[in-house]
Amino acid sequence: MCVPDSLMLSALLSCLALCRSVGPVVPDSLRLRGGTGIDAPPSSACIKVYSENAQGYDTWFEEAYFPGIIGAEFTSVERAMESFFPERSPLRVLEVGMGTGRFCLHLKKRFPEHEMLGVEPAEGMRKLCLENFKKHNQTVQLLECAAEDLDGCSQQVGEKVDCALFVTVFGFLKDHDKAVRNVHAVLSPTGCVLVAFIDKTTAWGKDYFLMTKEDKFYTDGTCVVHLAEVVEVFQRNGFDLVEDACYQTLMNYNETKLDLDFVEDEEEALKVERGYGDGMWSVLCFRPRS
Ligand SMILES: C[S@@+](CC[C@H](N)C(=O)[O-])C[C@H]1O[C@@H](n2cnc3c(N)ncnc32)[C@H](O)[C@@H]1O
C-alpha cells in the first residue's frame, strides 16, 4: 500500500472522525450501481502503469515513513488466516494481483509450511516479485493472469487452493463478479478468501481516497473501497462473511491525539482487532456457501 508522507498523514489524522460500523447487510445508499463495479475502470491502463513503475511501487515498502503501519497491515492478514485455519497444517495460498510479492513473502516467512501461488497481470510487477522471493531464498509459483481470466489459467493453478488473497486489488478489478466467481471455482469448499483493503467508509479512508486520486498508481483504479460493496459482491457470488475471522487496524480512535509523528500511543493506533467497520485497514474473510 502507498503510505502518505508524514505531513499529509498528520493533516489527515487531525480530521479523523468516528466512523459508523457497516454490517454485512448492505444499506441501499451503498449498493453498487451498474452491477459490476466500484467505478469499474478498464484495468489495462492500470496494468501498464504498474508494469512500468514496479520499482517505484515496491520502494514504498522499503521507504515506509511509518513501518508500523505496514507491520499492522501484515499482522491483520496473518491473524485472519490463523483465525480461519487454527491448525498449522500446510495450505495452498493463492494471491490474486500479487504485485511485487511483499505481503505473500511476509506470509511465507511467517508460515513456511504453506505453498504460495500468485497471479499478476503486470509483467514488471511479476519480474520484481520473483526477484524479491529469490532475494529471500523463498519460492513462489507466479502466473501471468488477471483475476477475470483465472478460469483460463485454472489448469496451471492445479489443485484447489485453501486460501485466496486479494490485497489492495479489489478496486482495480474490471469485472468483480467474474473475478469472484473465478476464485470460487479454484477454491476448496473448506477454504476461504481474505480481502484486504482501505475502507472508504471510514473518515481516514475517505481522505486517503481523495489524496490518492491523482496518484499515477490509482488514477485507473483504487485501493480504497467501501466495505459494504466488497461484502455485497462476495455474497451475491456464493460466499458468506466469516465474522470471527475478520480483522482491522489503523483505528480512528482519537482524532485529536493520534499522530504517528509524535507517538504517544502508537500501540493503540496500530493495534489489530477482530471485527470490521472501525479500522481504516480491513481484512474480510469469506467462505464458500455450502
Ligand atoms: C496496489 S497493487 C497491490 C499489489 C499487492 N497485492 C500488494 O498489496 O502490494 C495492485 C495490483 O493489482 C494488479 N491488478 C490490476 N488489475 C488486476 C486484475 N484485473 N486482476 C489481478 N490483478 C490486477 C496490478 O497489476 C497491481 O500489481
Image: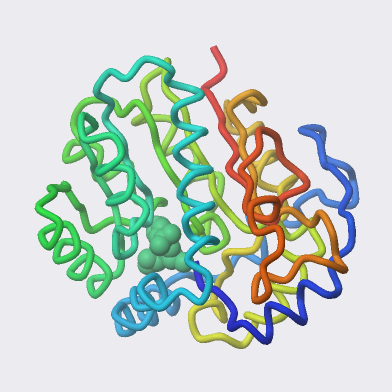
88 versus 36 height, above or below:
above
Residue at coordinates 47% horizontally, 53% vertically from top-left?
Answer: 167
Residue at coordinates 68% horizontally, 39% vertically from top-left?
Answer: 231
Report the front residue among 290 and 270: 270
User: Looking at this rendering, what residue extends furthest in the front direction?
Assistant: 264
Report the front residue among 185 and 15: 15
Image quadrant, ligand 1: bottom left
Q: How many marks?
A: 0
**Colour style of the rendered protein structure:** rainbow
Residue 192 at x, y percent in the picture? 46, 27
Residue 119 at x, y percent in the picture? 29, 52
> In the drawing, does residue 106 fall left or right of residue 139?
right
> In the drawing, does residue 163 fall left or right of residue 111?
right
Check the picture and name the quadrant holding the C terminus: top right
Residue 272 at x, y percent in the picture? 61, 43
> In the drawing, does residue 91 fall left or right of residue 181?
left
Residue at coordinates 41% horizontally, 51% vertically from top-left?
Answer: 148
Residue 281 at x, y percent in the picture? 63, 53
239 versus 140 height, above or below:
above
Report the front residue among 128 and 111: 111
Residue at coordinates 58% horizontally, 43% vertically from top-left?
Answer: 283
Q: Quadrant of residue 93?
A: top left
